[in-house]
Image: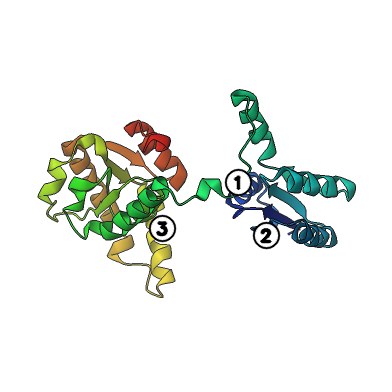
Amino acid sequence: MREIKIFILSDSVGETAHSVAQAAAAQFSNFQINYQRFPFVRTESLLKTVLAQAEKDQAAVFHTFVDRKLSKMATEFCQKHDLPYYDVITPALDTFSGITHTQPANHPGTVHALNDNYFDRINAIEFAVTYDDGKNASGFLEADVVLLGVSRTSKTPLSLYLANRNLKVANLPLVPKAQIPDEIWQVDPKKIFGLTNDPEKLNDIRRQRMVQYGLNPDTMYSNTDKIKEELASADKIFKKIGCLVINVANKSIEETATLITESLGYNEANK
């Protein structure tokens, strides 16, 4: 498998450039992508050193410099030395300059500033951890989102993903014949989302989980008939609540989260 080296350069943490590179690389699964991140590159001397290494390694360069001088230097170096490159941020800055008829502040890392939005996100993450897996039923009444589903329907990772978008999420695993907390019936059904899966897919996920634990994968936990019973029981609860049901079988965490936020009419910028 051919290896492709990608250098991620930024005068901040480089998360944006890394995400863009990963999103594009996902369409080229036959190649091994090797990412190297160089955050907080804020001096010309450091930038020259990193670019020299990129030339030596024949790496492609993805960069996000809000400092126009550093951005220009990176672009011109790549052009001069025939290195593939992508300037992630400059076109966007130019677009906003055109819209606002003003110049950007050119402050690296502004998106990660320790403002109220940042601390709201931290609180949301702490909330998701505290009220994960039905640990405390009182959380359902305080949550922005309540996730219900049988085991291995991505409740916890989805809770944390939504928490990173400033939503307080509590989740509850559904087990046949188990008592549903009274608090669930007091929550607005619009805030509740039922997560389901295809029996075959869930069987495969659970078997893999057992193997990871070093246990026998052929148990009642991964039995297809048992799984079908669990899903049917959960579906009855979803119908009784009247909540939106999402089949996560062929959906990424991001796709499921988008369905939830769109259903809520959620606008992160106004959170």
Q: CA distance from mark 1 to mark 3?
A: 45 Å
Identify the amino acid type marked 3: Ile
Label total for image:
3
Q: Secondary structure at mark 1?
A: loop
Residue 238, how many percent across, how many down? 22, 40
Q: CA distance from mark 2 to mark 1?
A: 18 Å
Identify the amino acid type marked 2: Phe
| Viewer-nearest of discs 2 and 3 | 2
Front residue of 64 and 6: 64
Q: Earlier in the sequence, mark 2 or mark 1?
A: 2
Q: Secondary structure at mark 3?
A: helix
Front residue of 28 and 267: 267
Residue found 43% across the figure and 48% down from its top: 115
Q: Which residue is mark 1?
A: 107
Q: Earlier in the sequence, mark 2 or mark 3?
A: 2
Q: Secondary structure at mark 2?
A: strand
Residue 235, how many percent across, how many down? 23, 42
- Is residue 149 visible to the viewer in this orientation of the structure? no
The answer to whether the residue labelled 2 contacts the one labelled 3, judged by CB atoms less than 8 Å apart, is: no
Q: Which residue is mark 3?
A: 205
Residue 190, how many percent across, how many down? 24, 34
